[in-house]
Amino acid sequence: MKKIVSRGACLLLALGLSLNAVGCQKSNENNKIKEGQSISSEEAGMSINANGKNETFKPSDYTLEAKKEYVYEYLGLKFKLSDKFRNYIADKKIAMLDNQSPIDKELKYAILTFEKMTEEQKNAVIEKMGDGYKNWKNELERIGTIGIFEKNTSKEKISKITKCDTHTKIGVSSDGKYDCYLSTNSGAESNLLDELKRTEIQIIDKKERPKNGFVLSEKTDLENTEAFNKESVKDLRKLSTKDINGKDFTSKDFKKYDLTMVNVFATWCTACVKEIPDLVEVQNEMKSKGVNIVGVVTDTVDDNGKNKEAIEKSKLIHEKTKASYPFLMPDKTNFNGRLNGIQAMPETFFVDSNGNIVGDTYSGAKSAKEWKQVIEKELKKIKNNKSPQLGAFIHSF
């Protein structure tokens, strides 16, 4: 089973720390508990796993991998690190991470960061919940960054974002909207700074920002593995999968509704789970309008097949949040490939009664009120698309 979220981005997005985005950092404003309302993961005690233990992970395992060349089409940049610097990353002496401004707003900046790791930081194991990752990340020693900033961003602001004091302008992005910089921290070790400065950086054609807002996905890696283009997936007409309780779900289930909202999430994504009570409210209100909701729990399947721990945790989340809709597992095709390459969770898309993927893709958690507005808009699109066909049918008589 192909991993659904890129290794470098998945944990950072899950913890909602790197991107400062709504992906897993939704405000608590919409999560206040009302009497009789189903509750979110944190209120339900979902910061622990099914065995009652807080889950842990090793942050250094989720840093970006060492490669001969990095190509970031949405930044309009590609670069090659020196052999020595690349080896430092491979040996986990340097952590390469990514960071961008909130994905649900206009892009202000996006950077790749390079940090020195001590042996203690390299081997650290921390809890997923709480401030463990944030503290681990803040204790790393910044060497420098490579990235883009909205034109006319002041050096003072760039210094604050990059935690660097020296900025070398590489040029201007191909669309003319961003300045490209190599930034360095003069307080870092001189040999590391010298190696980073040897990086060969080239400005390339900058692709338009993807719908999910995440610009830090690569085009290719060293083995020339093409990043998956989920925009090319048009339908789920041959879908055949099961929910977390083993019940079959196929494309025939789409026929029962005018529109099905597919909410893709993972058990480790706090904001994803927090959003479920809002989706329950939406499901209860919109079902009479021909709208259904299904959740897809990405981590219930991994490279080894079924992830039993994630399945059990999904069942617990389903019970505690009083979810009124099914939680599905990815099938062997990853929903006809639609789940491949997802960079931010939750991600939501829509399917019509014929199994066609329709409308826009939405990244990040939303309130019930916001989702109702989105659904009304998507329903209107479907009706408008059907109207010309109906008119032609009537005219034929």
Image: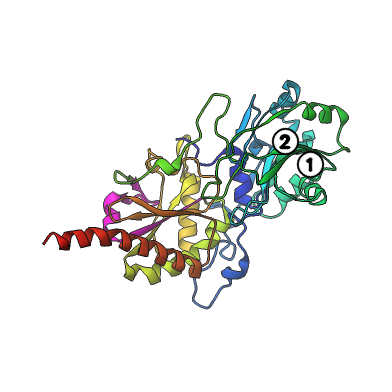
Return the residue at label 1. Answer: 140
Where is 235 relative to 203, above or below? below
Residue 121 is situated, as x and y percent measured from the top left of the image, at 76, 38
Which amino acid type is marked by label 2? Ala
Q: Nearer the viewer, residue 16 or 196?
A: 196
Which amino acid type is marked by label 1? Leu
Q: Residue at x 26, y 52 (%)?
A: 252
Where is 337 relative to 15, above or below? above
The stretch of residues the image draws in magenta is: 241-266
Residue 373 is situated, as x and y percent measured from the top left of the image, at 45, 68
Q: Is residue 391 left or right of residue 296?
A: left
Residue 273 falls inside the magenta stretch: no
Q: Residues within 10 Å of mark 1 (few under 14, many from 20)?
A: some
Residue 263 falls inside the magenta stretch: yes
Q: Where does the C terminus fall, quadrant-wise?
A: bottom left
> Can residue 390 be seen?
yes
Which of pointers 1 and 2 lies earlier in the amino acid sequence?
Answer: 2
Return the residue at label 2. Answer: 95
Residue 230 is situated, as x and y percent measured from the top left of the image, at 44, 42
Q: Residue at x 56, y 53 (%)?
A: 269
Where is 215 relative to 82, above or below? below
- Asked whether the residues under the numbered discs 1 and 2 touch, taking CB atoms below 8 Å apart as contact, a structural biologist would say yes
Q: Residue at x 54, y 76 (%)?
A: 34
Q: Quadrant of residue 68?
A: top right
